[in-house]
Image (cartoon, rainbow, N blue to C red):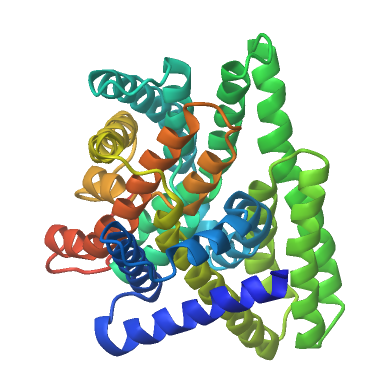
Amino acid sequence: MSFFEITAILMVMTAFFSYINYRFLRMPTTIGIMFIALMASLGIVLLGWLGVNVGQNGVARLLETVDFNQALLHGMLSFLLFAGAMHIKLDDLRSQKWAITVLATVGVVTSTFIVGALTWIVLDFLNIPVSFIYCLLFGALISPTDPVAVIGILKTAGVPKSLETKIAGESLFNDGIGVVVFLIILELALGGGDVTVGRVAVLFFKEAVGGALLGLAIGLIAYRMLKRVNNYQVEVIITLALVMGGYTLADRIHTSGPIAIVVAGLLIGNHGRAFAMSEITRIRLDDFWELMDEILNALLFMLIGLEVLVMPFTSELFMAGLLAIAITLFARWSSAGGAVLIMKTFRKFSPGAIRILTWGGLRGGISVALALSIPPVPERPTIITITYIIVVFSIVIQGMTLGKLVDRIYPDMPGKSYGG
């Protein structure tokens, strides 16, 4: 099938699932679409076990033609990050800069080692052969929170503004750290030579700092262009070029595309919105990127729901996935909680901050994409399946219940900002 035919089929399925959700389930759109896709996939698998083939092979072949890693990390992600970053205020980020920095760096690294060690113990107990280095690799890809899932859920959860900024800001910036840690461990796992402190520092500087500098540079270029134009069609095209061209350039020069686009999005969403756009342009640009965000989110979550058809499930892997959910939550609680307790000595935090940071640290498509990017080694199917189970739990269960947790912690003052 051609690229257009594949895209058309996926979009028709997304539209149909969206319609079913709106008419009958009334879940948040992305969660509802993924839930329906997941239920449909499980139904097809169950019928297949009973000897009734209702298109499982055809759908599986369709999914195998979609390179999830390429589609997300080198396609959808740039648009989704830009759309999310555009609506975050720099003043809010500055007020929470230390908390975001600690959570996105120390938190990710700490969680990587906690998840890796405990997963190794669990898999050894279940007689699933995965070496310690690949358990650490799993820890690296599952520890960063997913900005696509997090920002989408926070819109309706009613989290206090200060905590919302921490969680959203962390999710936007911890990808750079997570990818660096993932690449380092993957190189060690594949026997790519010695990894020295100097080499790690260079890789981090090139990915994270280089990505930020690139994002600032391309954002300033786009900002100056926007300031000299008063035509919303042209300005929308400029932002599209910024996202697509900037992410492609970051890939070519081997810096962090996600960080580059986040920085550019923050610049355009703040200074660009304030000084380079007319009121009509702001409205049209917001409408365009909100629609882009909704469409791509819906498509992405539908793909996640269907991926169960090509996952190598066994009873042992399913049990490992359930235990890994508990491990991941414990690691998030330990790393985020430890960071909060340390920072509480010199700043205030909202009541229930640790619980909300733990339950609101959602995992999503980025973790699945990183798992699928692992070369064909024996440990790959195990890591992919466990990752998928955690992501489904995170989006459906955590995403659906985060609002209830917030209501329980703040019963009288929903959405109010509490201190730092």
Residue 177 percent coordinates (x, y): 56, 35
Whether residue 103 is visible to the viewer of this picture, yes or no, is no
Residue 111 percent coordinates (x, y): 38, 29
| Residue 4 shown left or right of residue 361 in the figure | right
Residue extending farthest to the front is: 51
| Residue 85 shown left or right of residue 225 in the figure | left
| Quadrant in the rendering for residue 51 | bottom left
Residue 58 percent coordinates (x, y): 51, 66
Q: Residue at x 38, y 24 (%)?
A: 116
Query: Which is nearer the eye, 69 or 308?
Result: 308
Residue 317 percent coordinates (x, y): 30, 36
Query: Which is nearer the eye, 311 or 323?
Result: 311
Q: Is residue 272 above or below residue 60?
A: below
Q: Is residue 78 above or below residue 171?
A: below
| Residue 404 shown left or right of residue 208 in the figure | left
Q: Is residue 412 above or below residue 215?
A: below
